[in-house]
Image: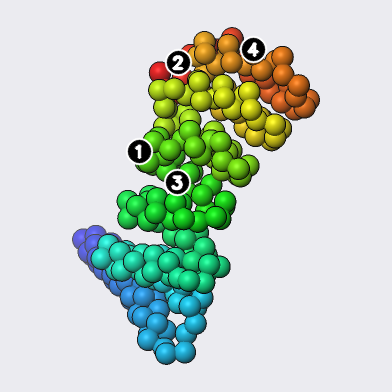
Amino acid sequence: MKRHQTYLLILILISASFSFYLFFFKNNNVSKNFSRTDQIKEKLKKNNLNENEKLQLYVDYYIATEKNDERDWAQSELIKLAENIDSQLADQATLKLIQISGKSAKTQEYLVKKIKKTENDLIIAHSVRVFSFNKNPWLLENINKLIAHKSILVRKASIQSMHRICPEQRWSILEKVRKSEKEQSVIEILVREVIRLSGPEAISFLTKMKNMILHDKAKVLIQEGLVNLETHLKPGPCN
């Protein structure tokens, strides 16, 4: 009987110790999270901060907090910096917005405005990828213009969006690319995207590409793609 009581007492002590550990661990983490956002707030109150320092603090705050209203505030401050007359600062803020909040409707709404006036090809290309991943209707409406953009980065991103946004005229759009594109790295992206689209149209498209003057890498991609598509013919993501 005494042995049974001893075992019971040990179990109670273990349970109590474990409960205390969980309580301490949970509250200690909460304290750390609160401390991090609180520290950032204190830093933001300093009068001698330059715009680049503010930019990084807003990014840190957005990442540190889990509250939607606080994230919205930090996001709004980043958008203000993205509108700064200092183009370098504005571009840095825009790229940070894409990095931390690309899925946000608010960020995408801003990027639509940004694309219309920026000359930064990197921002346009990254924005296209964000719109593609989130199937933003603006990209579908403007894909013809973007896929013929002067920038190789933008053309690549636009071609790679086809299997996500699935425009009805996708094959005629890609046919224009096939006939006009001279940059071999873009042609390789075109081949890979056609393979992703799959289906009989993809086989027909790659067969036509075999007659083009291409680098060896593109030729190999086409041949491997045809073999794979003909062996494992299946509906593509747009079918």
Label 4 crowd bin: few (<14), some (14–19), many (20+), radius 10 Å? some
Tag 1: amino acid: Pro
Judging from the image, what secondary structure is the residue with disc 3 in?
helix
Q: At 40% across and 18% down in the image, what residue appears?
A: 239
Tag 3: amino acid: Val
Q: At 57% across and 51% down in the image, what residue appears?
A: 121
**Mark 2 and 1 residues: CB-CB less than 8 Å, in contact?**
no
Whether residue 156 is visible: yes
The residue wearing badge 2 is 235
Relative depth, front residue between 105 and 83: 83
Q: Nearer the N terminus, badge 3 or badge 1?
A: 3
Relative depth, front residue between 165 and 176: 176
The residue wearing badge 1 is 137
Q: Nearer the N terminus, badge 1 or badge 4?
A: 1
Q: At 36% across and 80% down in the image, what residue appears?
A: 41
Tag 2: amino acid: Pro
Which quarter of the image is occupied by the N terminus? bottom left
**Mark 3 and 4 residues: CB-CB less than 8 Å, in contact?**
no
**Mark pair 4, 2: CA separation:** 18 Å
Report the side of 237 relative to 186 (left or right). left
On residue 207, the disc is 4
Q: Nearer the N terminus, badge 2 or badge 1?
A: 1
Relative depth, front residue between 11 and 34: 34
Q: Nearer the N terminus, badge 4 or badge 2?
A: 4
Judging from the image, what secondary structure is the residue with disc 4 in?
helix
